[in-house]
Image: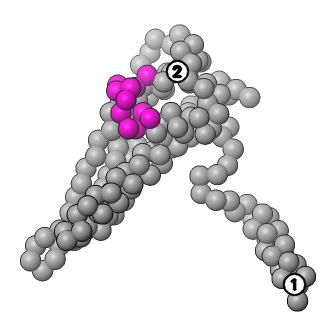
Amino acid sequence: MKPLRWCYLGLLWFILAGCGWQLRGVGTYQGPTSLNLLPEDRFAPLTLALLDAMHRGAVTPKEDAAISLYLGNEELQRRVVAVTSIGSPVQYELSLSTDFRYQLAGDKTLNTPQTLSVERVFDFDPSNTVAKSEEENTLLEEMRLELAQRILRHARNFSISHGQNQP
């Protein structure tokens, strides 16, 4: 019976591999291999998340890179989505956004900034404030990492459209 299980497991693996399924966030980064990162705040959590995403994608921060990334400050908005019968909030929508723009080295024209945002719905329990605040911080870290990965995907599109695709 055991060889039959291994056969089914192998068949499942081939089916998943054949359809192109992969874990979220896993894949090969095919953008520029180096970026000149110019954030408004070097120690902002979004900047640190972007440096982490660059490290994961094997993108080195260099001052003499062919493409510069100007990163604005993050903006967090919190909106009440649901309330209890007595009017206390039980669900929030978190929206994290930032402005950024890419520029080629030596190009004096200013490109228009782009804005990206990530939204999540967050359940809140007023009787368990400490645990919910830790959960909110974890959720914000995940949102920052997703925002950073999306910014790097834009770097790939920018480099392709401007003929700067590096191996």
Q: Residue placed farthest to the front in the image?
A: 130
Where does the image place residue 36, in percent across and percent down from the top left? 52, 21
| SS state under label 1 | helix
Where does the image place residue 12, in percent across and percent down from the top left? 79, 74
Residue at the disc numbered 2: 36
Residue drawn at x 65%, y 28% is 33
Where does the image place residue 46, in percent across and percent down from the top left? 40, 38
Residue drawn at x 19%, y 68% is 126
Q: Residue placed farthest to the right in the image?
A: 3
Q: Nearer the viewer, residue 154 or 135?
A: 135
Q: Tell me the quarter of the picture where residue 100 sits.
A: top left
Residue drawn at x 70%, y 26% is 166
Residue drawn at x 78%, y 63% is 17
Closer mark to the observer between disc 1 and disc 2: 1
The region drawn magenta spans 38-48
Answer whether labels 1 and 2 touch (C-beta < 8 Å): no
Above/below status of 159 relative to 52: above
Q: Tell me the quarter of the picture where residue 161 sits.
A: top right
Q: Which mark is residue 2?
A: 1
| SS state under label 2 | strand
